[in-house]
Image (spheres, rainbow, N blue to C red):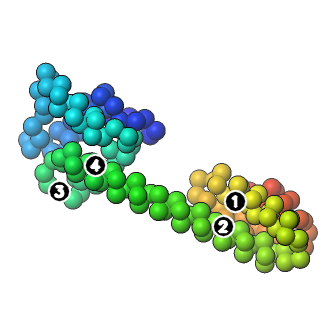
Amino acid sequence: MSGKGEMFSEKSVERLFNSIENRYSGKFKRPKDDDAETRRIWTKALNGYTVEEVRNALNIHVVQDAWPPTIADFVRICKEERERKTESERLTKKNVCYIAERAINTSYPAISLEEFHKAKRAFEKRCYEAENPAKAALRLERYMRTLADETSPIEAIEGAEI
């Protein structure tokens, strides 16, 4: 199966069947080439998930079960993984927000409320541009502490290498 953001499609079904066949050799009965209905059912069931999500579901299933997955297995695992990812992203945003507030309040306690909100937005924006927002927030917080007496919060945020 291919690309990260590519949505699951009819082409993906064949690649999926190949992957299942390779991982469960002798245990997976591949649909015949003229069985378009089975391919349509699999495509419809997995529609809305990305190729990457389906690939991850197969990898998870391989570790959990010695027998090939059913459509229901794929849908369940894809749904659980999407929910887990959403919760992780929510927690990351909450952590970045908290770290931003702590960094600004600690390093620049005398700034106005308007400056605080402007700095917080800039801080969060910089962090979300990074590959790992939570790590970026911690690095930026440390950097801001070293410059608190020398620059404004915005200058510190914009000048940081995170």
Q: CA distance from mark 4 to mark 2?
A: 33 Å
Q: Which mark is residue 124?
A: 1
In the rendered structure, which disc, 1 or 4, sits on the residue that comes first in sequence?
4
| Mark 4 residue crowding within 10 angstroms, few (<14) / some (14–19) / many (20+) | some
Q: Is residue 18 visible?
A: no
* Residue type highlighted by circle 1: Glu
* Residue type highlighted by circle 4: Val
- Name which residue lies at 29% across and 54% down: 77
Secondary element under disc 1, as helix, strand or loop, is helix
In the rendered structure, which disc, 3 or 4, sits on the residue that comes first in sequence?
3
Residue 60, given in percent of the width and then of the height, sits at: 28, 55
Q: Are marks 2 and 1 in contact (CB under 8 Å)?
A: yes
- Name which residue lies at 27% across and 53% down: 76
In the rendered structure, which disc, 4 or 2, sits on the residue that comes first in sequence?
4
Looking at the image, the residue that sits furthest to the right is 150
Q: Residue 80 is drawn in which quadrant? A: bottom left
Q: Which mark is residue 97?
A: 2
Residue that mark 4 sits on: 75
Q: Residue 45 is drawn in which quadrant? A: top left
| Mark 2 residue crowding within 10 angstroms, few (<14) / some (14–19) / many (20+) | some
Look at discs 3 and 4 and give the one toward the viewer: 4
